[in-house]
Image (spheres, rainbow, N blue to C red):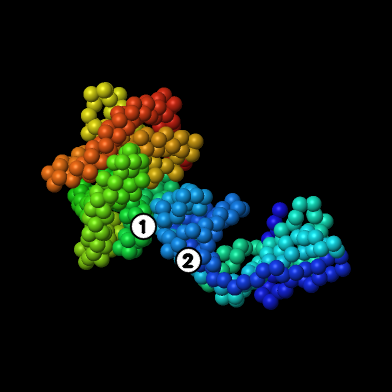
Amino acid sequence: MPVSLVAAGGWTVPSSSPGWNVRCVASRKSTLSLRDTHTWALFFGGSALGFENGEWIGETAGSLIRDAATPAAARCASDFGEGRMRAFLAEAIGVRALRETARAGLQRELHEILDGSDKVVLRLEVTRLTAPEGPVYITLHPLLGYGADAARMLQILGTSGCGPAPETLIGGVYRLLGVQPLAYSAKPPLTFAPGSEAAAAVVEILQGLLEVARWNEFGIAGDVDTEFLHDFRVALRKMRSVLSLTKGVFSGDATTRWKKQLGDVCRKTNALRDLDVQILGREDLCAMLPEELRPGLDRFFEESGNARAVQARKVAAYLKSKSYTALVETLPGEWENPVYRGPAAAHPVGLMASARLQKRFQRIRKLQKSITPETTDSAIHALRIECKKMRYLLDSFGRLFPADCALPIAKSLARVQNRLGRYNDTSVQQDHFLERAHGCLETGDCRMALALGGLIGSLHHEHTALRKKVVEALAAFCNREHRALVKSLIPLDQ
């Protein structure tokens, strides 16, 4: 098994000694371009990615993945050809975009250790940091059956100034260049206790979510990747829901005004998000069609891409506007202003959250019981909104309750939301594609009309099958076990 070591700059490989010979079989200078997302998904996921000498090199779970076919300009997992590298990145970064996080000059060397009969028994990989100047990283590769030689070499390396590596090469590069990876989470850290006043707790939640939203502004304005807008919108929706779900903490007029202001911001981004979702789903949509119908979608996605570019510019301009800047800079102060406090402001937040969660669960149960084969999609969508609100309550206040109660509820609710979300998507997509197909028939674009018709048919079949799964997931969520768990949501200090 390889052994990683490190030595100070200037270290040299020990020379030959009685019984074996050391020879350098390869040496080259190179530049390593390290890549990661703005959220450091690879670094904090224990993986790494770099581009060196025309080749992508990924490291995960101790194994290397190489790709020499993909250009250096690749930014997303979808830019890589089918294979291990694309699969690794799709899992590690999703739809996030890559960027260069650091660049280092290296001197790579490969040394072989030969015994008295000139048989290779060990290999040494030596990597010298040249820009910035830094340590030397050594990896000893023992060959099968030569454990004694490996032990002897480790001893020699130890006396020559090598020691256990306290950091990886990438960690060393970041340290020397002053690059500090910072963890990102769309869920802000919260500190309030179950006995905290409701107003103080809600203000902490709102301000934390606003910070998340504002962190994502640069990625939206720069059109880095679609996740920035997604997280921005989720933070806004959570703020609006928290204001709705904590009725009485603030005055009614203030709550209504803040919800409208946040809703107006969200609506400015609706068209861009719809187009993002549509374009991101291109591969899945094409896979629904026979091969001969797929070319009919080319112009559809070309038009969607053009429309998206227009919307992206509009949203970027809005985020730089005086009206938006004034709003997001004013809201935190207003939330803290005692003049906007409501009758429930001083109530213990734990008890308030417990009551609101139980009320929301009962509302979901009532709607779940009313579902019949005739229930409309709009009614099921209303139930989806109720599930979302309960999920936002759990996200905001779940830490106040025993984990063995809150976590199973959140996990089951997430399963329901996933099915309800896809059910809603198939409904909305059918309506959208039908409208576009009518337009194609009017303009005489039969190829696109046929492709869209094929998609509508496929989505209809999926939508019908999903309805049964939605009903099953809702029934499982509202079962006796979960009813008992919801009743057990008692704040930890009670």
Q: Is residue 250 above or below residue 361?
A: below
Q: Nearer the viewer, residue 79 or 195?
A: 79
Identify the residue shown where x is 68% and y is 66%: 110
Dot 2 lies on which element?
A: strand
* Amino acid under disc 1: Asp
From the top left corner, tell me how far across and down residue 36 is, in percent.
Answer: 47, 60
Q: Mark yes or no: residue 388 visible.
A: no
Q: Is residue 417 above or below residue 157?
A: above
Q: Residues within 10 Å of mark 1 (few under 14, many from 20)?
A: some
Quadrant hosting residue 333:
bottom left
Left or right position of 130 against 147: left
Q: Is residue 203 above or below residue 470?
A: below
Q: Which residue is mark 2?
A: 101
* Amino acid under disc 2: Thr
Extreme residue toward the front, this view: 292
Identify the residue shown where x is 29% and y is 46%: 295
From the top left corner, tell me how far across and down residue 432 is, in percent.
Answer: 21, 42
From the top left corner, tell me how far across and down residue 390 is, in percent.
Answer: 34, 38
Left or right position of 144 against 64: right
Dot 1 lies on which element?
A: loop
Q: Which residue is mark 1?
A: 225
Q: Mark yes or no: residue 447 visible.
A: yes
From the top left corner, tell me how far across and down residue 145 is, in percent.
Answer: 79, 52
